[in-house]
């Protein structure tokens, strides 16, 4: 059997039919990613394969280090060709890692190269990719068009200007590129050295002087409205676990003013302040009809020495061994009590908590919107075959798979769109194989509706994109 052939991951007749006749040509909505708005605004081109393939991909960086590759060839000052050679030498050791699939899917889908990457093929692949990169349409706009990407949701700090998004809107790009409101730095009351410079940026972009808590809330609300005007329909927050210690406005004010004066607050006060802000952000999202995303269960920068040398988002993060349930229940219940429960997508990183998250979504459905509270797709360490199947099974067993908003890349790379294909193949195989075993109805029209909904239609409707 050929590797990555047209029936890759499709192990039954109905699975193949569902993918090739239904899922394959569905447009893409990548509603959460970390693509650069600047690169889209400038219609960026890449100088070489290493820049586009290795430049921002900490998934690959982790594997390079695991293969004994020195940091100079990972994030250091080695030449692009040397870094690519190190990657070519690592790929043959990656059998059964999903990156082996993704690497060769990307070579096929972007560069029309069906060779296996290895030291023997590295020169040929480098040269063939170089020729492809030189083609007129091999730029950010061209790739978005090639993969029929209808919506991209970038991840944006409220203190950053939206100039790039405005430039994209004014261009002739057909893809809608929308900002996502991610106010991580607003919680840093334990680090005034980080918080106060960020507040200065927020003051400048909001034109509001921030000395008291009420000023901060006004500035954040203004930026939330600015994002809405720019097309934003989602917010995002990342935590080890949800903050869960209740906090009054008076208490939050004291905590904020302490940090604003340059004095760090305790871990407990940080959690109280974060809880207060998270309820406030829920109110903003609910009022605008937005969807709140909660990415839970990651511990960042665990290798403090390497973090100090290389910096964040470089592959030194891992799955948290943190109880999630009680804190998440406390937060969601607080939103309900404050009449501030927006649409929510919950992303889990520890597989032991899949059923916890999936079951919890059912507790807070209120009948106002189908699938109002979503159990999000397999995330980060779980966005691979086993992780996706576990997420789909937990969701199917506790809720309505038919209302699921589907896949996203969560990626910094413009080479990641085949992950939607990967997910769709896994989904079609799961549904088609069960149908062929008699575990689902032998009704191709009904099964097709399910595949179309999860691949594209649910996200388009749920997030209000209208594309």
Image (cartoon, helix red, strand yellow):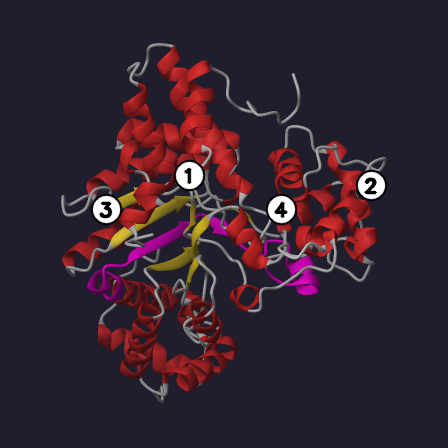
Local SS, label 2: helix
Residue that label 4 marks: 59
**Nearer the N terminus, badge 2 or badge 4?**
4
Is residue 270 at all visible to an observer of this figure? Answer: yes
Local SS, label 3: loop
Is residue 411 at all visible to an observer of this figure? Answer: no
Of tags 4 and 1, which is closer to the observer? 1
Query: Residue visible at 60% across and 48% down?
Result: 415
Q: Gap in Å between the C-alphas at discs 2 and 1?
A: 33 Å
Residue 288 forms part of the magenta stretch:
yes
Residue 83 picture location, percent across and down: 79, 52
Within 10 Å of disc 3 (Cα), the crowding (few <14, some 14-19, many 20+) is many
Q: Is residue 194 above or below residue 84?
A: below
Q: Nearer the viewer, residue 301 or 222?
A: 222
Of tags 1 and 3, which is closer to the observer? 1
Local SS, label 1: loop
Of tags 3 and 2, which is closer to the observer? 2
Residue 368 picture location, percent across and down: 14, 47
Q: Are marks 2 and 1 in contact (CB under 8 Å)?
A: no
Q: Is residue 312 above or below residue 349?
A: below
The dot on residue 26 is 1
Q: Gap in Å between the C-alphas at discs 3 and 2?
A: 49 Å
Residue 28 picture location, percent across and down: 44, 45
Residue range highlighted in magenta: 284-312
Query: Residue visible at 69% across and 52% down?
Result: 54
Q: Gap in Å between the C-alphas at discs 1 and 3?
A: 23 Å
The dot on residue 372 is 3
């Amino acid at each position: 059997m050929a590797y990555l052939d047209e029936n890759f991951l499709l192990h039954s007749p109905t699975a193949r039919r569902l993918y090739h006749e239904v899922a394959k040509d569905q447009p893409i909505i990548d509603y959460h990613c970390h693509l650069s708005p600047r690169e889209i605004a400038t219609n960026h081109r890449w100088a070489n394969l290493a820049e586009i393939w290795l430049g921002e991909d900490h998934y690959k960086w982790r594997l390079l280090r695991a293969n004994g590759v020195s940091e100079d060839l990972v994030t250091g000052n080695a030449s692009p060709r040397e870094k690519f050679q190190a990657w070519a030498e690592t790929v043959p050791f990656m059998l059964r890692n999903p990156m082996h699939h993704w690497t060769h899917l990307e070579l096929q889908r972007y560069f029309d190269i069906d060779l296996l990457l290895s030291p023997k093929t590295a020169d040929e692949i480098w040269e063939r990719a170089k020729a492809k990169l030189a083609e007129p349409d091999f730029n950010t706009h061209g790739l978005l068009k090639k993969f029929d990407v209808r919506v991209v949701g970038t991840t944006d700090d409220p203190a950053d200007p939206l100039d790039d998004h405005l430039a994209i809107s004014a261009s002739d790009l057909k893809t809608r590129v929308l900002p996502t409101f991610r106010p991580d730095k607003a919680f840093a009351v334990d680090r005034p050295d980080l918080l106060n410079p960020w507040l200065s940026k927020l003051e400048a972009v909001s034109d509001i002087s921030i000395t008291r808590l009420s000023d901060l809330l006004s500035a954040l609300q203004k930026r939330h409205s600015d994002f809405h005007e720019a097309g934003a329909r989602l917010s995002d927050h990342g935590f080890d676990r949800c903050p869960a210690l209740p906090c009054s406005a008076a208490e939050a004010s004291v905590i904020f003013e302490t940090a604003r004066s340059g004095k760090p607050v305790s871990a407990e006060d940080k959690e109280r302040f974060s809880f207060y802000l998270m309820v406030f952000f829920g109110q903003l999202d609910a009022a605008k009809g937005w969807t709140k995303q909660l990415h839970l269960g990651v511990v960042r920068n665990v290798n403090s020495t390497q973090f100090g040398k290389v910096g964040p988002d470089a592959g030194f993060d891992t799955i948290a061994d943190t109880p999630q349930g009680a804190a998440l229940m406390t937060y969601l219940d607080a939103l309900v009590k404050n009449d501030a429960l927006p649409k929510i997508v919950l992303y889990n990183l520890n597989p032991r908590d899949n059923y916890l998250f999936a079951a919890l979504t059912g507790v807070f459905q209120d009948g106002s919107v189908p699938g109002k509270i979503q159990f999000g797709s397999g995330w980060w360490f779980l966005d691979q075959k086993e992780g996706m199947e576990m997420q789909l099974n937990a969701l199917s067993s506790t809720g309505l798979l038919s209302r699921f908003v589907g896949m996203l890349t969560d990626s910094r790379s413009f080479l990641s769109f085949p992950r939607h294909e990967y997910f769709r193949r896994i989904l079609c195989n799961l549904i088609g194989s069960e149908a062929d075993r008699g575990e689902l109805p032998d009704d191709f029209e009904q099964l097709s509706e399910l595949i179309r909904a999860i691949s594209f239609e649910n996200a388009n409707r749920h997030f209000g994109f209208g594309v």
